[in-house]
């Protein structure tokens, strides 16, 4: 036993201060590299790499429960509805108020040099166009066959050339739609092309309507012609709205909803709500909300925040936070605050844009409900309506943050809606142009995606940061005070090995000396 202690003391005495400096410096460097990697991984993927590896790979090896196992099938079946709800909430929807490519998005690019649309967003639009504007019988008509290929083209100029080629053969509604969306540089030009498309589209719709019951092929063609006609009329209404003919736009949208009442998937009522708010026709806005703000229908930021705006309008002009704190909230004020809390719970990203705490960008062509993309699309068109109602933004500013006290764990349990979906950040980063290229290949921030709820730093990032700081401090102290730190290091190592020495003494006292001698030789 004394030989073991002497060998340990001899080993500690041979360690020089340079060794301690090298040891602590290397430890600090390694922990610093781990910290940098962990921080980068967290910023990119929103989780800790070490934690993810531990849960995904080490836990099954250590006997953890496999997530794919059929254990607790009852609870799994019980959560099926909420899982399906999360899937539906993470579905990407067509933006009902999306801008025109040529007349608006491209003009923005020409002026600023920034691309307002992501490749993912434009690819979704291409899929929509192929779904709505093509059918299996297009190969029977040369013009439609050309357009079927045009919608699949990635190059905008190739699509525009194909549309012109199709129009040279015969009048084609979808070709005029493409030119109105992508080639027209003003809303007036786009409206002219849409009127041309409307004349052709109505003729095709009437012919296919007479033949729709003659077979599956005619039924698919009629469905395509219906989609084309609805799209054209809706875009014409949007042109009228943008050109200041708001009453005409409202009439067109009402007629369209009456003619095709079952096509609720296009969310035409959101275009109607925005136009009615522009006219300050709040009674008709309330009537539309009474029809579409139903528990059985999917919600949107437009529905929830418009309902909150109408409730706030009744009290906002006389609302004072000081007076409310003294006398309490009246019934009307309580209803307005509850409506704001409901809207904020549905989409917590909107208030920062309405209160101009976060800068707006052009809305994408697709949005994710309850996500940052939907908040941008709503605020882009409705901020002016909130400003028009006196005191509405002040009431929103005073009350919106109170929502989060009612839902302390939004990812686990909601108050009026399902828990907030965890997929919104990933989808919004695909839909929104978060970065852009500038000179000398420098990547500059274009839009910082809003994240809710704010993610706390993982434990391993904090741990590696503390470890890196501690070892760096030890390295600095060892370099500055080598003799003193050497004494501390030897005392620490001696204390660390003291339990081991105690165990060795006990083992030596129990085992025979001859056996212990043989073990030490081994």
Image: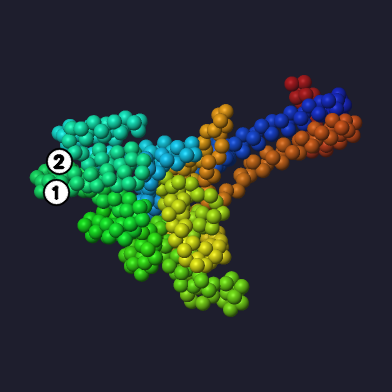
When the figure is inspected, residue 91 is found, relative to residue 407, above or below; the finding is above
Image quarter hosting the C terminus: top right
- The crowding category of the residue bearing disc 1, from other C-alpha atoms within 10 Å (few below 14, some 14 to 19, many at least 20), is few
* Count of numbered marks: 2
Residue indicated by mark 1: 206
Identify which residue is drawn at 75% across, 24% down: 519
Q: Can residue 266 be seen?
A: no
Identify which residue is drawn at 83% across, 37% down: 492
Q: Nearer the viewer, residue 54 or 173?
A: 173
Q: Secondary structure at mark 1?
A: helix
Residue indicated by mark 2: 217
Residue 165 x %, y %: 23, 31
Relative to 444, 35 lies left or right: right
- The crowding category of the residue bearing disc 2, from other C-alpha atoms within 10 Å (few below 14, some 14 to 19, many at least 20), is some
When the figure is inspected, residue 437 is found, relative to residue 387, above or below; the finding is above
Q: Nearer the viewer, mark 2 or mark 1?
A: 1
Residue furthest top in the image: 521
Q: Nearer the viewer, residue 442 or 54?
A: 442
Residue 268 x %, y %: 31, 55
| Of the image marks 2 and 1, the number of the one nearer the N terminus | 1
Mark 2 and mark 1 in contact? Answer it, CB < 8 Å.
no
Q: Nearer the viewer, residue 295 or 485?
A: 295
Identify which residue is drawn at 50% across, 70% down: 316
Q: Can residue 184 be seen?
A: yes
Q: Nearer the viewer, residue 250 or 349?
A: 250
For residue 512, which quarter of the picture?
A: top right
Residue 17 x %, y %: 85, 27
For residue 275, which quarter of the picture?
A: bottom left
Image quarter hosting the N terminus: top right
């Amino acid at each position: 036993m004394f030989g073991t202690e002497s060998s340990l003391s001899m080993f500690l005495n041979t360690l020089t201060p340079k060794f301690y400096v090298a040891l602590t410096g290397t430890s600090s460097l390694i922990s610093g590299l781990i910290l940098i990697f962990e921080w980068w991984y967290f910023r990119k993927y929103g989780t800790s790499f070490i934690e993810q590896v531990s849960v995904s790979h080490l836990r099954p090896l250590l006997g953890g429960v496999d997530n794919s196992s059929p254990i607790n099938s009852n609870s799994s079946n019980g959560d099926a509805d909420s899982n399906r709800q999360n899937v539906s909430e993470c579905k990407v929807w067509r933006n009902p108020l999306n801008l025109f490519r040529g007349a608006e998005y491209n003009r923005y690019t020409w002026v600023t040099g920034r691309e307002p649309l992501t490749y993912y967003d434009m690819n979704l639009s291409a899929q929509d166009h192929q779904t709505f504007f093509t059918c299996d019988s297009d190969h029977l008509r040369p013009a439609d066959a050309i357009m079927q290929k045009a919608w699949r083209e990635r190059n905008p100029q190739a699509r525009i050339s194909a549309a012109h080629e199709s129009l040279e053969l015969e009048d084609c509604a979808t070709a005029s739609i493409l030119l109105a969306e992508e080639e027209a540089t003003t809303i007036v030009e786009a409206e002219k092309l849409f009127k041309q498309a409307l004349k052709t589209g109505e003729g095709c719709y009437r012919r296919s309507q007479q033949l729709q019951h003659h077979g599956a092929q005619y039924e698919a063609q009629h469905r395509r012609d219906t989609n084309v006609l609805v799209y054209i009329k809706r875009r014409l209404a949007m042109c009228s709205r943008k050109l200041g003919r708001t009453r005409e736009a409202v009439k067109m949208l009402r007629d369209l909803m009456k003619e095709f009442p079952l096509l609720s998937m296009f969310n035409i009522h959101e275009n109607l709500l925005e136009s009615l708010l522009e006219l300050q026709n709040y009674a008709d806005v309330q009537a539309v909300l009474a029809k579409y703000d139903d528990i059985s229908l999917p919600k949107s930021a437009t529905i929830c925040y418009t309902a909150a705006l109408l409730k706030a309008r009744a009290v906002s002009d006389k609302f004072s936070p000081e007076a409310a704190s003294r006398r309490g909230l009246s019934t009307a004020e309580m209803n307005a605050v509850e409506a704001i809390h409901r809207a904020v719970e549905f989409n917590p990203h909107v208030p920062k844009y309405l209160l101009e705490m976060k800068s707006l960008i052009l809305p994408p062509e697709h949005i994710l409900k309850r996500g940052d993309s939907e908040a941008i699309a709503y605020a882009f068109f409705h901020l002016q309506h909130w400003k028009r109602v006196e005191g509405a933004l002040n009431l929103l500013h005073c009350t919106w943050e109170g929502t989060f006290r009612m839902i302390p764990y939004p990812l686990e349990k909601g108050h009026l809606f399902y828990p907030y979906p965890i997929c919104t950040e990933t989808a919004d980063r695909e839909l929104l142009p978060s970065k852009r290229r500038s000179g000398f290949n420098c990547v500059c921030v274009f839009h910082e995606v809003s994240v809710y709820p704010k993610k706390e730093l993982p434990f391993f990032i904090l741990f590696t940061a503390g470890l890196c700081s501690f070892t760096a401090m030890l390295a600095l102290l060892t370099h500055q005070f080598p003799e003193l730190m050497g004494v501390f290091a030897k005392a620490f190592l001696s204390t660390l090995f003291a339990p081991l020495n105690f165990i060795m003494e006990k083992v030596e006292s129990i085992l025979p000396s001859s056996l212990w001698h043989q073990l030490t030789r081994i």
